[in-house]
Image (spheres, rainbow, N blue to C red):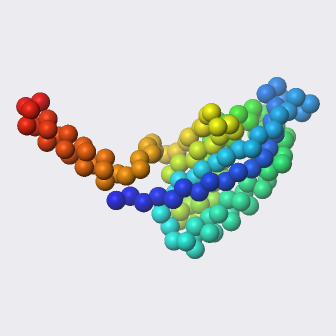
Amino acid sequence: MNKYIELTFRFNSSHSNVGDKLERHFHTFSMTLTIDYVTKEIENTVVRYINEFLNQFNDKYLDELDYFKGVYPSIETIGDCFFDSIQHLLSKMNVNLLQLSISDSPLKAYLVGDRLMLPNLNDNISNKNFALMMKFLERSGN
């Protein structure tokens, strides 16, 4: 059985679709990290480090930050930059970042990771249902 932890963070920032500070708009971003299961002590350290990382973006105009010089800070760009930075940060603690999900509205989320992570409430039920389906197909000759 695989075990993971999902940690969700929020931060407020602004950016502009046209690169003009007068045209900026604000978002409350929601970011969820999926990591391999760790002890509560390591989890608390991860939360502290991620909050420190996000502080450099909180209440900032993203277009002016070095992270996004020369690129439009879209949700995809933010997700890619954050994944690389957070993956590097967590690897120093021997914590494996599997996936990062980031959204600036409830209608869309951008997911980035080294492998596809499909949400499943109970892998055991899925495995059991798959095995039952395979038995049925064997009996029916398919």
Residue placed most toward the observer, 131 or 34: 131
In-image side of 53 versus 109 (left or right): right
Residue at image position (81%, 38%) is 26
Q: Position of residue 105 (x, y in %)?
A: 68, 37
Residue placed most toward the observer, 42 or 137: 137
Residue at image position (37%, 52%) is 122
In-image side of 21 versus 142 (left or right): right
- Specify whether residue 120 is in view: yes
Q: Residue furthest top?
A: 18
Q: Residue furthest right?
A: 22
Q: Is residue 127 above or below residue 110?
A: below
Q: Is residue 91 above or below residue 102?
A: below
Q: Position of residue 22 (x, y in %)?
A: 92, 30
Q: Quadrant of residue 117?
A: top left
Residue placed most toward the observer, 86 or 70: 86
- Specify whether residue 65 is in view: no
Q: Is residue 123 above or below residue 80?
A: below
Q: Position of residue 103 (x, y in %)?
A: 65, 40
In-image side of 102 versus 2 (left or right): right
User: Which quadrant is the N terminus positioned in?
Assistant: bottom left
In-image side of 51 versus 66 (left or right): left
Q: Position of residue 92 (x, y in %)?
A: 59, 64
Residue at image position (83%, 34%) is 25
Residue at image position (79%, 27%) is 17
Q: Quadrant of residue 40?
A: bottom right
User: Which quadrant is the C terminus positioned in?
Assistant: top left
Residue placed most toward the observer, 108 or 125: 125
